[in-house]
């Protein structure tokens, strides 16, 4: 019997259910070797035809393409960290900025890198698709690194070899400063814009197997650290010697090779079409809810509005089962008499259950995401205060000088070791959820801040009056770097898996970008904290503040302990929201929507255990 479309005020005449079942049985027993013949046989059934097209698309992709994208990630990261890891010293030695100003500028720049991930995710999900988004932003990235190499060679490194910690550079011209900031923010725009999309694009190459995708995200973060390893050792060493332009040129070469590697298998990639702008869809849910605020929500979710058949109304998205969180939003899917007679029904008054659940997913993810920001404050100290701390420690092991920024190699080694331990020792026997792993990462991050504070106490005790560097060896920083690295494996890999897996199909890139957006806000919060702390603790000559120009006169240890205390409070709040969270549940029998499909007042509900 045909079902009435409440927004069309008419009747649709779908294939009789019994006839459909009989046709399906016939097709299941028919073996056809020629795929074109199969498509011809099913030309009268659009749902099955779309399933066949999706099957054809799945023949592309695979681990070979995923590995190429991992190589692209490693090379692009090498180029990025060749610019970013030593940026705080470039600002102090070449641009003539003070410690606090340089730390704040690096935090703002790093935050901007990751904030641009939201821009890339939006364009990818809505309009461009993953492949085109990655291509455009990687081209911008190459242009930015090239422009930085140019400006450092012709405008900033004057005289040659300056910026090594001994030879001072000339005051840069206004034009040089302007081109420098343009170049580094092009780098930020290009790298940040394509990173979350690249992660999702790589996961697209694999079949819908949770273990395979979990492995890919681990290898993705592993590849990131492989690229960073070269930058944090070889490139940093040469840049520390004043060979800044040469280091930037190596980064440029790596960025170009990464782009070429990405473009090479273009015809072999598996593509996912963009799902359209999600902002109107989410806004429609809230507007429809407000308009129906006085409507009584039915007790049975099966009475809520959903489209007919296996196809979702949202292009490129599967159907989503009803959930028990934010039940007030269900009013958007309640069918009123006005909806039945079609006199006032529009997309801004009546939404499908899948569309309502998409909005619910965004709201459920937000509290978890906000709790990760303090961890990102911990992480960002490696690129700023850790480097400044190491720069005033005894950096000699025998006659060999260790650049302060190179100490982050212990973070990378820790990531390598921790990833191996987790994937091959812990994972086969104990499989903690993504939320559990993120909580473990936060605890280890707190330990890292405590270790950094204790190291700073020891450094201050061994300061020699009139001397910049403390007698304490820089190797005392190893524990704090190792702990941060171990925490990353649990926190950031867990975030990638969690946000990508829990985001609706139409918001996959947004899910991946939330991890980077957390880093962005972490950098901004860190910068804000430095400003607030200095405003409160600085009292003229007698009290230069916790992070003064001369760190030997400050108390950076107290700043580390402050971060640890805030992270401990954040951990308690995180536990509450992690226990409250209800996972998304897709209808695996549905197919990704095209233009919408027939409408019917039906819904499937999955009871969460």
Image: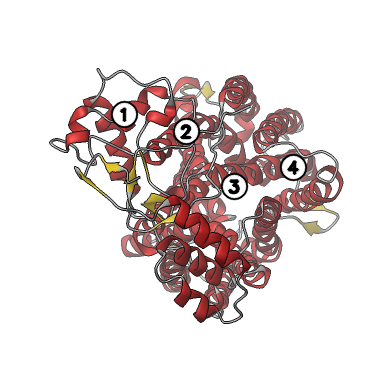
Please tell me which of labels 3 and 2 falls first in the chain.
2
Mark pair 3, 2: CA separation:
24 Å
Q: Which mark is residue 446?
A: none
Front: mark 1 or 3 = 1
Which residue is label 1 attached to? Answer: 334
Front: mark 3 or 2 = 2
Q: Badge 1: few (under 14), some or many (20 or more) residues near its Cα, within 10 Å?
A: many
Left or right: residue 175 versus residue 136 is left
Q: Badge 4: few (under 14), some or many (20 or more) residues near its Cα, within 10 Å?
A: many
Q: Quadrant of the N terminus?
A: top left
Q: Which residue does the image show at 85% across and 41% down from the upper left?
A: 429
Residue 76 horizontal/vertical position (percent): 57, 66
Mark pair 1, 4: CA separation:
48 Å
Task: Assign a secondary structure to mark 3.
Answer: helix
Please tell me which of labels 3 and 4 falls first in the chain.
4
Q: Which mark is residue 496?
A: 3
Q: Which residue does the image show at 74% across and 28% down from the upper left?
A: 454
Which residue is label 2 attached to? Answer: 322
Mark pair 1, 3: CA separation:
35 Å
Please tell me which of labels 1 and 3 falls first in the chain.
1
Residue 332 horizontal/vertical position (percent): 31, 31
Please tell me which of labels 2 and 4 falls first in the chain.
2
Q: Is residue 194 above or below residue 531?
A: below
């Amino acid at each position: 019997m045909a079902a009435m479309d409440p927004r069309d005020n008419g009747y649709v005449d779908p294939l009789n259910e019994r006839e459909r079942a009989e046709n399906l049985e016939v097709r299941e027993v028919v073996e056809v070797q020629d795929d074109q013949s199969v498509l011809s046989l099913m030309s009268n059934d659009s749902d099955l035809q779309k399933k066949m097209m999706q099957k054809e698309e799945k023949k592309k992709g695979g681990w070979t393409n995923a590995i190429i994208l991992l190589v692209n990630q490693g090379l692009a990261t090498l180029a990025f960290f060749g610019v970013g890891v030593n940026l705080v010293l470039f600002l102090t030695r070449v641009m003539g900025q003070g410690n606090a100003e340089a730390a704040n500028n690096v935090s703002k720049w790093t935050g901007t890198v990751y904030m641009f991930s939201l821009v890339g995710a939006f364009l990818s999900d809505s309009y461009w698709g993953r492949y085109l988004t990655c291509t455009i932003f990687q081209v911008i990235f190459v242009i930015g690194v090239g422009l930085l190499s140019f400006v450092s060679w012709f405008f900033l490194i004057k005289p040659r070899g300056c910026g090594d910690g001994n030879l001072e550079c000339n005051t840069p011209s206004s034009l040089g400063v302007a081109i420098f900031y343009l170049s580094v923010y092009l780098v930020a725009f290009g790298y940040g814009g394509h990173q979350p999309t690249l992660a999702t694009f790589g996961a697209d190459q694999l079949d819908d197997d949770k273990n395979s995708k979990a492995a890919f995200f681990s290898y993705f973060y592993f590849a990131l650290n492989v690229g960073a390893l070269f930058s944090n050792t070889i490139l940093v060493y040469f840049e520390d010697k004043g060979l800044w332009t040469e280091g930037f040129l190596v980064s440029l070469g790596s960025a170009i090779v990464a782009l070429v590697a990405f473009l090479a298998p273009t015809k072999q990639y598996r593509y996912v079409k963009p799902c359209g702008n999600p902002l109107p869809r989410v806004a429609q849910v809230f507007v429809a809810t407000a308009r129906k605020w006085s409507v009584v929500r039915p007790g049975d979710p099966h009475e809520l509005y959903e489209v007919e058949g296996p196809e979702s109304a949202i292009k490129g998205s599967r159907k989503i089962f009803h959930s028990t969180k934010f039940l007030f939003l269900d009013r958007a899917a309640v069918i009123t008499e006005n909806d039945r007679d079609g006199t006032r029904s529009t997309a801004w008054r009546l939404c499908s259950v899948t569309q309502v659940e998409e909005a619910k997913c965004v709201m459920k993810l937000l509290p978890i995401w906000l709790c990760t920001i303090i961890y990102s404050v911990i992480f960002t100290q490696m690129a700023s205060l850790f480097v400044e701390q190491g720069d005033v420690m005894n950096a000699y092991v025998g006659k060999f000088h260790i650049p302060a920024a190179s100490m982050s190699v212990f973070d990378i080694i820790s990531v390598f070791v921790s990833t191996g331990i987790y994937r091959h020792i812990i994972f086969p026997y104990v499989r903690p959820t993504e939320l559990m792993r993120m909580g473990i990462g936060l605890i280890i991050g707190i330990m890292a801040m405590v270790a950094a504070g204790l190291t700073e106490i020891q450094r201050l005790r061994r300061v020699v009056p009139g001397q910049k560097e403390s007698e304490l060896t820089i190797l005392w920083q190893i524990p704090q770097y190792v702990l941060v690295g171990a925490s990353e494996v649990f926190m950031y890999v867990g975030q990638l898996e969690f946000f990508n897996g829990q985001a609706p199909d139409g918001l996959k890139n947004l899910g991946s970008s939330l991890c980077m957006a957390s880093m962005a806000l972490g950098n901004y919060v860190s910068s804000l904290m430095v400003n607030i702390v200095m405003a409160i603790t600085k009292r003229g000559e007698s009290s230069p503040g916790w992070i003064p120009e001369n760190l030997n006169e400050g108390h950076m240890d107290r700043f580390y302990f402050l971060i640890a205390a805030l992270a401990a409070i954040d951990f308690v709040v995180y536990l509450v929201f992690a226990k409250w969270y209800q996972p998304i549940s897709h209808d695996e029998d549905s197919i990704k929507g095209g233009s919408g499909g027939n409408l019917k007042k039906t819904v499937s509900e999955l009871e969460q255990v």
